Image: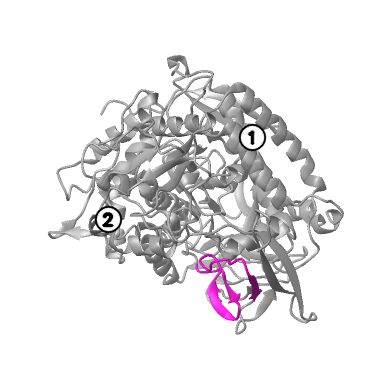
Amino acid sequence: MNSELDGDREFPMAHLSTDVLIVGAGGAGMYAAIAAAREGASVLLLDKGQVGRGGATIMAQMTVAVALGEQEPDSSQLHFQDTLNAGRGLCNEELSLLLCDDGPKRIREMERWGTRWAREDGHIKQEMAPGHSVKRCCYVDFLNTGPAVAATLRRKVSEIAAVRRVSNLSVIEIFVRDGRAIGALALDLVSGQFISIQAQAVILAAGGLTKLFARNSASANMGGEAYALALWAGAELIDMEFVQFFPIGHLAPRLVGMDPIMWDPFRYKLGGKLLNGRFEEFIDRYGSTDFGKYNVMRDIAAYAILKEVEAGRGTAHGGAYLDFRHIPEAQLRGAFGPVIDRLLANGIDLTKTAVEVGPMAHYHMGGVRVDAHMQSRVEGLYAAGEAVGGANGANRLSGNAITEAFVFGERAGAHAGEKVRRLESHWHDDVARESVERFSNLRNAHSTGTTTPIAVQAELQQLMWKKAGPFRTGEKLNTALERIVQMQRELSGLRIGAQGQFNLDLQDWFELRAMLTTAEAVVQSALARSESRGAHQREDFPAPDDSLLKNQVLELKDGELSARWLAPVRLTQQ
Amino acid sequence: MSGSSIKTSKLHVKRGAPGEAERYDDFEVPYEDGMSVLDALCWIRSHLDSTLAIRYSCINANACKTCMALVNGTVEYTCIAKLTPNALTVEPLPKRPLIRDLVTDILPEDEKL
């Protein structure tokens, strides 16, 4: 059965039907679509923005970590060890090994499909990046990795007849019947109508939650929906306290057309000075050195920058200066060619101006708890890419995010595609009818409020940044939790405009509803982890506590979040 | 310029859906050097009128290519079109079917319902 709109059904909404429904069309979702179709499944690939043009992949201008061994000898075992070291004891080793083992296959497959990895002397060029023991990171010049791989995957999925793509469709609830995922309810932004979707399997590929934080480095549409959808459907989440904050994201001057974390390779290759608002070196005040080496650890850089700001020595936009004025223009151009012109088009002349940088939310290590088939505990509900929790433990190794998007996307698609061949449909119209009845009156019921969903989103972003950001305390987290719970109660009173087509209030409202659930999961997990480990830093518990060398697993019980602690998944001796 | 330390910019924005009478709304937004037209449109949605329909996905990477509109009569990506301290007119793309306000139907045929 392929996905066709069916207007003749008894219940009052449009209906689509497919074998595999994929929620989110970034790198993981598109790869999952290709893999599911290879298994003979029909696929419906949805994105709330435009297919292949939103999410994290397209913004990732940096590198992809894979043990190709093209630049120097390497092995997936070595990549695996580096990944575990970065993860500070909390990696799900089964998932980490899968990521490292399958990475090379996916990168070579992408090359066959047209991605032009940077090459040198007849081999794929691989660079060193922090945390890697060998030169392992490939890329597409210049700082164009994400847009290039997104273009390859967009072209590939568009060539497959079994994959139907639909843009501007937001999934707002997964249908579950007798413990099995059977489809989803979606909002068509263009028409303002609800659409019911019947599926044999559902893959959540809308990971990432950077939009929860006022300062973030990804696309504007990553509100953490995959995590909320999974929880509501009965799946478990793992490691939700581990949000990765990138220490020197771009703050000012306003920069468009670039990834805000682009300064990292600049700093390593050229040597950029980190200076406080008074143009003084400051890293040495925090137990480290940077001058002349430019390699201070990320967590120390983030801490030092925020402490200088707290002491009143920050820059105008609340960060530090990154200064390249000591580097001759020819050297800047030699290293970054056309990127220098893109900076100039933004009015940024690195020979004359220091830019302002600071920590920002960048990536989420936590996510849906899945088995090695990427299936959650809800039968037929899978996760892929950043939506998956566990592979990166407490801290992600740089370059593992795109690898994980491809590897977990491919695995989820292949397993779901293979499984649906063996399944009888478990669909029942009543499940969709009940779901839509809960939301159908939203526009009328919300015409009188004064506060808009987007205004509350902005407040939540400030709250999460200030109270649950890079450096946390029990007091701050409790304040955040209290306000989040209040905001959840206020959801029913927010104003939604009456307009039918392209009603962004309505989309904002559903997005906010998911953001609040995910934010609560992050804050509750962060409160319970009374130690500092990896990306989770508590000022009131500054050291690691080995009794907490466990993963925190969340589920919904009677509508309330409930946590338990589990020993990390280790591989048995091989 | 006035003596005020806060600079502002004025946007003259075409509104409405197919079949409705033509109308323009005027908005005043805080202006900072380097701001894009999309920044201003997002600010309007957050602070003045959340019902304004705009289209964007990646917001500032000029990667999604979905935020096109007419800015002072020229087709621009609003995410890289610079805001100016003067008044700007923003209108939907003229050769595409209008959905509402600044949003037109630009999706490929095979990405629609």
Residue type for callout 2: Leu
**In this picture, which residue range is highlighted in magenta?**
B65-91
Q: Is residue A209 left or right of residue A174?
A: left
* Residue A302 lies in quadrant: top left
Mark count: 2
Viewer-proximal residue, A109 or A395? A395
Q: Chain of mark 2?
A: A
- First-in-chain label (1 vs 2): 2
Q: Is residue B89 left or right of residue A140?
A: right
Q: Is residue A472 left or right of residue A196?
A: left
Quick one: label 1, few (<14), some, or many (20+) residues within 10 Å?
Answer: many
Residue B73, magenta (yes or no) = yes
Q: Position of residue B45 (x, y in %)?
A: 69, 59
Q: Can residue A373 be seen at all in this image of the molecule?
A: no
Judged from the image, the secondary structure of the residue bearing numbered disc 2 is: helix
Q: Quadrant of the N terminus of chain A?
A: bottom right
Q: Which of label 1 and label 2 is nearer to you?
A: 2
Q: Residue placed at 38% from the left, 51% from the top?
A: A262
Q: Chain of mark 1?
A: A
Q: Residue placed at 39% from the left, 67% from the top?
A: A156
Image position of B27 with respect to A448: above or below: below
Residue A339, magenta (yes or no) = no
The residue indicated by pointer 1 is: A520
Q: Position of residue B40 (x, y in %)?
A: 63, 61
Q: Which mark is residue A332?
A: 2
Judged from the image, the secondary structure of the residue bearing numbered disc 1 is: helix
